[in-house]
Image (spheres, rainbow, N blue to C red):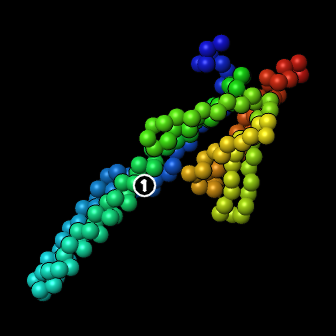
Amino acid sequence: MAESDAQEFYRAELRPHRSLPPKGFAIVMAILAVGSFCISVAFVLRGAWPVTPFFGLDVGLVYLAFRLSYRSARQREHLRLTEDELTLERVDVYGGRQRWRFQPFWARVVFEERDETSNHLSLASHGKSVTVGAFLGPAERRKVAFSLKDALSLWRKRVASPHTH
């Protein structure tokens, strides 16, 4: 059976959240650059010209920090549960891909709640496990864990025990 023909019980694409969209980033950088320029002009007019390069440096470092943050947002994970398998495909910031396949009957969703602000989600089977959604916030990880557990439960009812329906 082709991958696209299999009945799908669950599908999710996990991406890191970035609260500032690219347009907002451009506005923040423009305000920061204009503000820094005005302040540096004031320092030059007072004869403190040696400090002006630092105003450009701070804008450059803020820009670099945002660019690194946006680059890390390119990573993503795809979860898919079909009749035949549960797959996790991870795409890193450079586009490299890793794929894990689990037989759904043996797959376990391991969700460890540490406290209100910290938890860990992984898929486990046959003594091996892989972390899921490490870049997500705790509430998002919790939501994925419970929805994936529900999907596996539904899979077990419909596929693993077809004689009960």
Where is residue 50 shown, x and y percent of the image? 17, 80
Judged from the image, the secondary structure of the residue bearing numbered disc 1 is: helix
Relative to 70, is 3 on the left or the right? right
Relative to 138, is 159 on the left or the right? right
Compared with 105, 127 (above or below) is below
Residue lying at 77% horizontally and 37% vertically, measured from the top left: 125
Relative to 31, is 114 on the left or the right? right
- Crowd rating for badge 1 (residues with CA inside 10 Å; few <14, some 14–19, many 20+): few
Residue lying at 70% horizontally and 45% vertically, measured from the top left: 122
Where is residue 108 shown, x and y percent of the image? 77, 39
Residue at the right extreme of this rendering? 164
Relative to 99, is 93 on the left or the right? left
Compared with 84, 114 (above or below) is below
The answer to which quarter of the image holds residue 83 is top right
Compared with 61, 45 (above or below) is below
Which quadrant of the figure contains the C terminus?
top right
Where is residue 67 shown, x and y percent of the image? 36, 54
Q: Which residue is disc 1 drawn over?
A: 69
Residue 48 shows in the view:
yes
The answer to which quarter of the image holds residue 41 is bottom left
- Type of residue at label 1? Ser
Residue lying at 74% horizontally and 54% vertically, measured from the top left: 112
Where is residue 20 shown, x and y percent of the image? 40, 56
Residue 153 shows in the view:
no
Residue lying at 37% horizontally and 58% vertically, measured from the top left: 66
Give 49 or 163, whichever is nearer the viewer: 49
